[in-house]
Image (cartoon, rainbow, N blue to C red):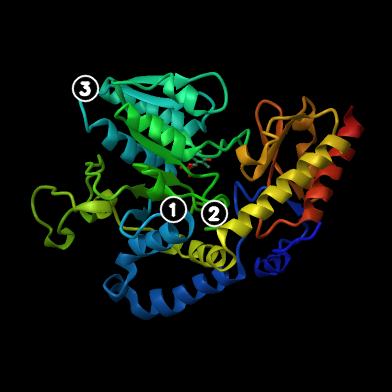
Amino acid sequence: MKDLLAEYRSRFVESPGVVAYLDGNSLGRPLAASVDRIAAFATEQWAGRLIRGWDEGWLDLPLAIGDELGRVVLGAAPGQVTIGDSTTVLLYKLVRAAADRDEGRTELVIDRDDFPTDRYVLEGIARERGLTVRWIDEGDVTPDRVAAVVGPKTAVVVLSHIAYRSGFLADIPAITSVVHDAGALMLWDLCHSAGVAPIDLDAAGVDLAVGCTYKYLNGGPGSPAFAYVRAGLHLRQPIQGWLGSRTPFAMGQGYEPADGIRGMLSGTPPIIGMLAMRDMVALIDEVGLDAVRAKSIALTTFAIELADSRLPAARLATPRDPAHRGSHVTLDHPAFESIMPKLWARGVIPDFRRPDGIRLGLSPLSTSFDEVELGVDAIAAELALVS
Ligand SMILES: *Cc1c(COP(=O)(O)O)cnc(C)c1O
Protein backbone atom coordinates (compact mmCIF):
# COMPACT_ATOMS: atom_id res chain seq x y z
CA MET A 1 0.00 0.00 0.00
CA LYS A 2 1.54 3.31 -1.09
CA ASP A 3 1.31 5.78 1.79
CA LEU A 4 1.59 9.30 0.44
CA LEU A 5 1.52 10.80 3.94
CA ALA A 6 4.03 8.40 5.54
CA GLU A 7 6.65 11.12 6.06
CA TYR A 8 4.41 13.00 8.52
CA ARG A 9 4.44 10.22 11.11
CA SER A 10 7.91 11.26 12.23
CA ARG A 11 6.52 14.61 13.39
CA PHE A 12 4.79 12.86 16.31
CA VAL A 13 6.45 11.95 19.60
CA GLU A 14 7.18 8.23 19.95
CA SER A 15 5.37 6.17 22.57
CA PRO A 16 7.67 3.46 24.02
CA GLY A 17 6.16 -0.02 23.98
CA VAL A 18 3.28 0.91 21.67
CA VAL A 19 3.39 -1.11 18.46
CA ALA A 20 -0.04 -0.15 17.04
CA TYR A 21 -1.86 2.94 18.30
CA LEU A 22 -5.42 2.56 17.06
CA ASP A 23 -7.16 5.08 19.28
CA GLY A 24 -6.37 8.39 17.62
CA ASN A 25 -10.10 9.10 17.67
CA SER A 26 -10.12 9.10 21.47
CA LEU A 27 -6.82 10.82 22.15
CA GLY A 28 -4.55 11.98 19.34
CA ARG A 29 -0.78 11.56 19.74
CA PRO A 30 1.34 14.63 20.56
CA LEU A 31 3.25 16.44 17.85
CA ALA A 32 6.87 17.23 18.74
CA ALA A 33 6.12 20.83 17.76
CA SER A 34 3.45 20.96 20.49
CA VAL A 35 5.85 19.78 23.18
CA ASP A 36 8.22 22.60 22.18
CA ARG A 37 5.40 25.13 21.96
CA ILE A 38 4.11 24.35 25.46
CA ALA A 39 7.60 24.49 26.99
CA ALA A 40 8.36 27.77 25.23
CA PHE A 41 5.06 29.23 26.39
CA ALA A 42 5.85 28.39 30.00
CA THR A 43 9.24 30.07 29.99
CA GLU A 44 8.83 32.92 27.52
CA GLN A 45 5.17 33.84 27.96
CA TRP A 46 3.99 32.71 31.38
CA ALA A 47 7.24 33.39 33.27
CA GLY A 48 8.44 36.13 30.94
CA ARG A 49 5.31 38.21 30.63
CA LEU A 50 3.31 37.23 33.72
CA ILE A 51 0.05 39.16 34.07
CA ARG A 52 0.96 41.42 31.14
CA GLY A 53 0.42 38.43 28.83
CA TRP A 54 -3.36 38.77 29.01
CA ASP A 55 -3.18 42.19 27.36
CA GLU A 56 -0.49 41.10 24.93
CA GLY A 57 -2.54 38.45 23.15
CA TRP A 58 -3.67 35.70 25.52
CA LEU A 59 -7.18 37.06 25.77
CA ASP A 60 -7.48 37.06 21.99
CA LEU A 61 -6.41 33.42 21.62
CA PRO A 62 -9.85 31.73 21.87
CA LEU A 63 -11.08 33.67 18.84
CA ALA A 64 -7.73 33.74 17.01
CA ILE A 65 -7.30 29.95 17.23
CA GLY A 66 -11.01 29.63 16.51
CA ASP A 67 -10.47 31.48 13.24
CA GLU A 68 -7.53 29.22 12.29
CA LEU A 69 -9.64 26.16 13.00
CA GLY A 70 -12.53 27.70 11.08
CA ARG A 71 -10.43 28.32 7.98
CA VAL A 72 -8.49 25.04 7.86
CA VAL A 73 -10.93 22.49 9.29
CA LEU A 74 -14.51 23.79 9.53
CA GLY A 75 -15.14 25.85 6.41
CA ALA A 76 -16.00 28.85 8.57
CA ALA A 77 -15.20 32.48 7.81
CA PRO A 78 -13.59 34.47 10.67
CA GLY A 79 -15.53 35.57 13.71
CA GLN A 80 -17.75 32.49 14.13
CA VAL A 81 -15.63 30.04 16.13
CA THR A 82 -14.32 30.15 19.68
CA ILE A 83 -12.29 27.75 21.82
CA GLY A 84 -13.10 27.04 25.46
CA ASP A 85 -14.97 24.82 27.92
CA SER A 86 -15.58 21.13 27.19
CA THR A 87 -17.80 19.81 24.41
CA THR A 88 -20.35 18.93 27.08
CA VAL A 89 -20.50 22.47 28.45
CA LEU A 90 -20.57 24.06 24.99
CA LEU A 91 -23.41 21.73 23.99
CA TYR A 92 -25.31 22.92 27.04
CA LYS A 93 -24.67 26.57 26.25
CA LEU A 94 -25.64 26.35 22.59
CA VAL A 95 -28.63 24.02 22.94
CA ARG A 96 -30.04 26.08 25.84
CA ALA A 97 -29.55 29.24 23.80
CA ALA A 98 -31.23 27.66 20.77
CA ALA A 99 -34.11 26.28 22.84
CA ASP A 100 -34.74 29.68 24.42
CA ARG A 101 -35.08 31.40 21.05
CA ASP A 102 -38.74 30.63 20.32
CA GLU A 103 -41.22 29.67 23.05
CA GLY A 104 -43.55 27.97 20.57
CA ARG A 105 -40.90 25.40 19.69
CA THR A 106 -40.83 22.87 22.49
CA GLU A 107 -39.01 19.86 21.05
CA LEU A 108 -35.35 18.89 20.93
CA VAL A 109 -34.34 16.19 18.43
CA ILE A 110 -31.43 13.76 18.82
CA ASP A 111 -30.34 10.30 17.70
CA ARG A 112 -30.89 7.49 20.24
CA ASP A 113 -27.41 6.16 19.48
CA ASP A 114 -25.60 9.47 19.88
CA PHE A 115 -22.75 9.83 22.37
CA PRO A 116 -24.07 9.77 25.96
CA THR A 117 -23.07 13.32 26.85
CA ASP A 118 -25.10 14.74 23.95
CA ARG A 119 -28.19 12.79 25.03
CA TYR A 120 -27.78 13.60 28.70
CA VAL A 121 -27.33 17.32 28.05
CA LEU A 122 -30.52 17.43 25.95
CA GLU A 123 -32.48 15.44 28.53
CA GLY A 124 -31.26 17.85 31.21
CA ILE A 125 -32.30 20.91 29.23
CA ALA A 126 -35.69 19.35 28.48
CA ARG A 127 -36.19 18.78 32.20
CA GLU A 128 -35.07 22.26 33.12
CA ARG A 129 -37.21 24.02 30.51
CA GLY A 130 -40.23 21.70 30.32
CA LEU A 131 -39.39 20.59 26.76
CA THR A 132 -39.70 17.22 25.03
CA VAL A 133 -36.90 15.14 23.52
CA ARG A 134 -37.84 13.53 20.20
CA TRP A 135 -35.63 10.56 19.34
CA ILE A 136 -34.42 9.29 16.00
CA ASP A 137 -34.70 5.61 16.80
CA GLU A 138 -34.24 3.43 13.82
CA GLY A 139 -30.55 3.49 12.90
CA ASP A 140 -28.15 5.72 10.94
CA VAL A 141 -29.16 9.35 10.61
CA THR A 142 -30.37 9.93 7.06
CA PRO A 143 -32.29 12.97 5.73
CA ASP A 144 -35.51 10.88 5.58
CA ARG A 145 -35.28 9.81 9.20
CA VAL A 146 -34.65 13.39 10.28
CA ALA A 147 -37.55 14.63 8.14
CA ALA A 148 -39.84 12.14 9.90
CA VAL A 149 -39.29 13.69 13.35
CA VAL A 150 -38.93 17.44 12.72
CA GLY A 151 -41.82 19.86 12.45
CA PRO A 152 -43.26 23.18 13.61
CA LYS A 153 -42.51 22.33 17.24
CA THR A 154 -38.82 21.54 16.72
CA ALA A 155 -36.47 24.04 18.34
CA VAL A 156 -33.13 22.44 17.55
CA VAL A 157 -31.77 19.20 16.09
CA VAL A 158 -28.48 17.85 17.50
CA LEU A 159 -26.64 15.19 15.50
CA SER A 160 -23.12 13.83 15.19
CA HIS A 161 -21.47 14.21 11.81
CA ILE A 162 -19.64 10.92 12.37
CA ALA A 163 -21.22 8.48 14.83
CA TYR A 164 -18.85 7.65 17.68
CA ARG A 165 -19.64 3.95 17.64
CA SER A 166 -20.50 2.86 14.11
CA GLY A 167 -18.51 5.52 12.26
CA PHE A 168 -21.52 6.37 10.05
CA LEU A 169 -20.96 9.71 8.30
CA ALA A 170 -24.07 11.88 8.05
CA ASP A 171 -24.87 14.23 5.14
CA ILE A 172 -24.48 17.71 6.65
CA PRO A 173 -25.87 19.79 3.76
CA ALA A 174 -28.92 17.57 3.11
CA ILE A 175 -29.90 17.17 6.76
CA THR A 176 -29.31 20.83 7.58
CA SER A 177 -31.65 21.76 4.78
CA VAL A 178 -34.35 19.34 6.03
CA VAL A 179 -34.09 20.94 9.47
CA HIS A 180 -34.27 24.45 8.05
CA ASP A 181 -37.35 23.52 6.03
CA ALA A 182 -39.01 22.79 9.39
CA GLY A 183 -37.91 26.21 10.67
CA ALA A 184 -35.60 24.71 13.31
CA LEU A 185 -31.94 25.26 14.12
CA MET A 186 -29.27 22.66 13.30
CA LEU A 187 -26.40 21.86 15.65
CA TRP A 188 -23.68 19.47 14.42
CA ASP A 189 -21.40 17.66 16.85
CA LEU A 190 -18.09 17.37 15.01
CA CYS A 191 -16.11 15.50 17.70
CA HIS A 192 -15.36 12.54 15.44
CA SER A 193 -14.92 14.44 12.19
CA ALA A 194 -13.01 17.65 12.90
CA GLY A 195 -9.56 17.25 11.38
CA VAL A 196 -10.30 14.05 9.48
CA ALA A 197 -13.22 14.74 7.14
CA PRO A 198 -13.84 17.86 5.03
CA ILE A 199 -16.51 20.10 6.56
CA ASP A 200 -18.03 23.26 5.10
CA LEU A 201 -20.26 24.80 7.77
CA ASP A 202 -20.74 28.14 6.03
CA ALA A 203 -21.64 26.61 2.68
CA ALA A 204 -24.19 24.26 4.27
CA GLY A 205 -25.78 27.12 6.23
CA VAL A 206 -25.24 25.30 9.52
CA ASP A 207 -26.42 27.29 12.55
CA LEU A 208 -24.36 25.80 15.36
CA ALA A 209 -21.57 23.30 15.87
CA VAL A 210 -19.37 21.97 18.65
CA GLY A 211 -16.48 19.53 18.75
CA CYS A 212 -13.53 18.10 20.63
CA THR A 213 -9.94 19.08 20.00
CA TYR A 214 -8.20 16.17 21.74
CA LYS A 215 -9.28 13.57 19.15
CA TYR A 216 -8.17 14.18 15.54
CA LEU A 217 -6.95 17.68 16.41
CA ASN A 218 -4.31 16.36 18.83
CA GLY A 219 -4.83 19.09 21.43
CA GLY A 220 -3.93 16.78 24.35
CA PRO A 221 -5.95 15.30 27.22
CA GLY A 222 -8.81 17.62 28.15
CA SER A 223 -7.91 20.33 25.64
CA PRO A 224 -10.83 22.76 25.33
CA ALA A 225 -13.58 22.28 22.75
CA PHE A 226 -14.71 24.58 19.95
CA ALA A 227 -18.06 26.20 19.24
CA TYR A 228 -19.35 27.63 15.96
CA VAL A 229 -22.25 30.07 15.83
CA ARG A 230 -23.32 31.26 12.38
CA ALA A 231 -22.75 34.99 11.83
CA GLY A 232 -26.02 36.86 12.17
CA LEU A 233 -27.63 34.29 14.47
CA HIS A 234 -28.27 36.13 17.72
CA LEU A 235 -28.64 33.77 20.65
CA ARG A 236 -28.26 34.45 24.34
CA GLN A 237 -26.29 31.77 26.16
CA PRO A 238 -27.12 30.74 29.73
CA ILE A 239 -23.75 30.98 31.51
CA GLN A 240 -23.47 34.73 31.93
CA GLY A 241 -19.83 35.25 32.82
CA TRP A 242 -17.82 38.44 32.75
CA LEU A 243 -15.74 37.54 29.67
CA GLY A 244 -18.87 37.06 27.58
CA SER A 245 -20.14 40.47 28.58
CA ARG A 246 -19.88 43.56 26.43
CA THR A 247 -17.31 45.33 28.63
CA PRO A 248 -15.60 42.81 30.95
CA PHE A 249 -13.08 45.24 32.39
CA ALA A 250 -15.66 47.91 33.23
CA MET A 251 -16.65 45.57 36.10
CA GLY A 252 -20.09 47.13 35.98
CA GLN A 253 -23.54 46.14 37.26
CA GLY A 254 -25.79 43.91 35.19
CA TYR A 255 -24.87 41.54 32.34
CA GLU A 256 -25.01 42.75 28.77
CA PRO A 257 -23.91 40.06 26.29
CA ALA A 258 -21.08 40.86 23.88
CA ASP A 259 -22.01 40.76 20.20
CA GLY A 260 -21.24 37.74 18.08
CA ILE A 261 -19.15 34.75 19.03
CA ARG A 262 -17.49 36.58 21.95
CA GLY A 263 -20.86 36.43 23.72
CA MET A 264 -20.42 32.64 23.94
CA LEU A 265 -17.44 32.99 26.32
CA SER A 266 -18.04 32.67 30.03
CA GLY A 267 -14.90 32.68 32.20
CA THR A 268 -11.12 32.92 31.86
CA PRO A 269 -9.99 30.95 28.80
CA PRO A 270 -7.80 27.83 29.27
CA ILE A 271 -4.78 29.18 27.41
CA ILE A 272 -2.25 26.37 27.98
CA GLY A 273 -4.82 23.79 26.91
CA MET A 274 -5.41 25.44 23.56
CA LEU A 275 -1.79 25.66 22.45
CA ALA A 276 -1.13 22.15 21.11
CA MET A 277 -4.05 22.07 18.68
CA ARG A 278 -2.43 24.95 16.76
CA ASP A 279 0.31 22.61 15.55
CA MET A 280 -2.13 20.01 14.29
CA VAL A 281 -4.23 22.66 12.55
CA ALA A 282 -1.02 23.98 10.93
CA LEU A 283 -0.06 20.45 9.85
CA ILE A 284 -3.51 19.81 8.35
CA ASP A 285 -3.19 23.12 6.54
CA GLU A 286 0.18 22.02 5.15
CA VAL A 287 -1.04 18.59 4.01
CA GLY A 288 -4.58 19.55 2.99
CA LEU A 289 -7.77 18.03 4.34
CA ASP A 290 -8.53 16.27 1.04
CA ALA A 291 -5.26 14.33 1.26
CA VAL A 292 -6.01 13.52 4.91
CA ARG A 293 -9.45 12.24 3.93
CA ALA A 294 -8.00 10.16 1.07
CA LYS A 295 -5.62 8.38 3.45
CA SER A 296 -8.42 7.99 6.01
CA ILE A 297 -10.51 6.14 3.42
CA ALA A 298 -7.52 4.01 2.41
CA LEU A 299 -6.85 3.10 6.06
CA THR A 300 -10.44 2.17 6.89
CA THR A 301 -10.78 0.23 3.62
CA PHE A 302 -7.60 -1.69 4.47
CA ALA A 303 -8.87 -2.41 8.01
CA ILE A 304 -12.17 -3.75 6.67
CA GLU A 305 -10.40 -5.96 4.09
CA LEU A 306 -8.14 -7.36 6.79
CA ALA A 307 -11.08 -7.96 9.12
CA ASP A 308 -12.98 -9.75 6.35
CA SER A 309 -10.12 -12.16 5.75
CA ARG A 310 -8.56 -12.58 9.19
CA LEU A 311 -11.47 -11.97 11.59
CA PRO A 312 -14.38 -13.69 9.80
CA ALA A 313 -16.17 -14.30 13.11
CA ALA A 314 -16.44 -10.57 13.87
CA ARG A 315 -19.37 -8.48 12.66
CA LEU A 316 -18.60 -5.18 10.94
CA ALA A 317 -20.62 -2.37 12.58
CA THR A 318 -19.26 0.30 10.21
CA PRO A 319 -20.59 1.14 6.72
CA ARG A 320 -18.74 -0.53 3.84
CA ASP A 321 -19.39 2.43 1.57
CA PRO A 322 -16.53 4.90 2.21
CA ALA A 323 -18.84 7.80 1.36
CA HIS A 324 -20.81 6.98 4.52
CA ARG A 325 -17.83 6.19 6.71
CA GLY A 326 -15.66 8.26 9.06
CA SER A 327 -12.14 7.36 10.15
CA HIS A 328 -12.79 4.53 12.58
CA VAL A 329 -13.93 0.96 12.11
CA THR A 330 -15.91 -0.95 14.73
CA LEU A 331 -15.99 -4.74 14.85
CA ASP A 332 -18.29 -6.66 17.18
CA HIS A 333 -17.66 -10.04 18.76
CA PRO A 334 -18.86 -11.41 22.12
CA ALA A 335 -15.30 -12.29 23.20
CA PHE A 336 -13.76 -8.91 22.43
CA GLU A 337 -14.16 -7.48 25.92
CA SER A 338 -12.13 -10.33 27.38
CA ILE A 339 -9.17 -9.84 25.03
CA MET A 340 -8.82 -6.07 25.46
CA PRO A 341 -6.37 -6.23 28.42
CA LYS A 342 -4.21 -8.69 26.46
CA LEU A 343 -4.09 -6.38 23.44
CA TRP A 344 -3.10 -3.39 25.55
CA ALA A 345 -0.45 -5.51 27.32
CA ARG A 346 1.18 -6.25 23.96
CA GLY A 347 1.19 -2.59 22.94
CA VAL A 348 -1.78 -2.85 20.58
CA ILE A 349 -4.16 -0.07 21.59
CA PRO A 350 -7.65 0.09 20.13
CA ASP A 351 -10.60 0.82 22.43
CA PHE A 352 -13.74 -1.00 23.41
CA ARG A 353 -17.32 0.21 23.07
CA ARG A 354 -20.23 -1.61 24.62
CA PRO A 355 -21.75 -4.06 24.23
CA ASP A 356 -19.01 -5.93 22.33
CA GLY A 357 -17.19 -3.65 19.89
CA ILE A 358 -13.51 -3.11 19.29
CA ARG A 359 -13.04 0.28 17.70
CA LEU A 360 -10.03 0.97 15.50
CA GLY A 361 -9.51 4.73 15.32
CA LEU A 362 -7.26 5.57 12.38
CA SER A 363 -5.68 9.02 12.42
CA PRO A 364 -4.29 9.54 8.91
CA LEU A 365 -1.30 11.70 9.82
CA SER A 366 -0.04 9.42 12.58
CA THR A 367 -1.35 5.92 11.77
CA SER A 368 0.51 3.61 9.37
CA PHE A 369 -0.88 0.73 7.32
CA ASP A 370 1.55 -1.56 9.16
CA GLU A 371 -0.02 -0.61 12.48
CA VAL A 372 -3.47 -1.50 11.15
CA GLU A 373 -2.25 -4.91 9.99
CA LEU A 374 -0.38 -5.56 13.22
CA GLY A 375 -3.49 -4.60 15.18
CA VAL A 376 -5.90 -6.81 13.25
CA ASP A 377 -3.45 -9.73 13.44
CA ALA A 378 -3.10 -9.28 17.20
CA ILE A 379 -6.89 -9.29 17.60
CA ALA A 380 -7.13 -12.45 15.49
CA ALA A 381 -4.37 -14.16 17.52
CA GLU A 382 -5.94 -13.28 20.89
CA LEU A 383 -9.39 -14.29 19.69
CA ALA A 384 -8.07 -17.68 18.56
CA LEU A 385 -6.77 -18.27 22.10
CA VAL A 386 -10.15 -17.73 23.75
CA SER A 387 -12.53 -19.25 21.20
C1 LIG B 1 -15.76 12.56 22.49
C2 LIG B 1 -17.15 13.09 22.39
C3 LIG B 1 -17.65 13.98 23.35
C4 LIG B 1 -16.83 14.34 24.56
O1 LIG B 1 -17.31 15.40 25.30
P1 LIG B 1 -16.40 15.99 26.47
O2 LIG B 1 -17.19 17.07 27.05
O3 LIG B 1 -15.10 16.42 25.84
O4 LIG B 1 -16.12 14.88 27.44
C5 LIG B 1 -18.93 14.49 23.15
N1 LIG B 1 -19.67 14.13 22.07
C6 LIG B 1 -19.20 13.28 21.14
C7 LIG B 1 -20.05 12.93 19.95
C8 LIG B 1 -17.93 12.72 21.27
O5 LIG B 1 -17.46 11.87 20.36
Question: Disc 1 versus disc 3: distance between alpha carbons?
Answer: 33 Å
Residue placed under numbered mark 3 in the picture: 104
| Residue at position x 56%, y 35% in the image | 163
Q: Locate residue 113: give its quadrant.
A: top right
Dot 2: what SS?
loop
Look at label 1 and name its amino acid. Pro
Residue placed under numbered mark 2 in the picture: 195
| Residue at position x 86%, y 33% in the image | 383
Q: Position of residue 255 (x, y in %)?
A: 13, 48
Q: Along the line of sight, which residue is nearer the eye, 23 or 306?
A: 306
Asked if labels 3 and 1 touch by Cβ distance under 8 angstroms, the answer is no
22 to the left or right of 254:
right
User: Which numbered circle lies on residue 17?
Assistant: none
Q: Position of residue 311 (x, y in %)?
A: 85, 34
Residue placed under numbered mark 1 in the picture: 224
Q: Is residue 247 above or below residue 43?
A: above
Q: Quadrant of the N terminus?
A: bottom right
Which of discs 2 and 1 lies nearer the camera? The answer is 2
The answer to whether any part of residue 43 appears in the image is yes
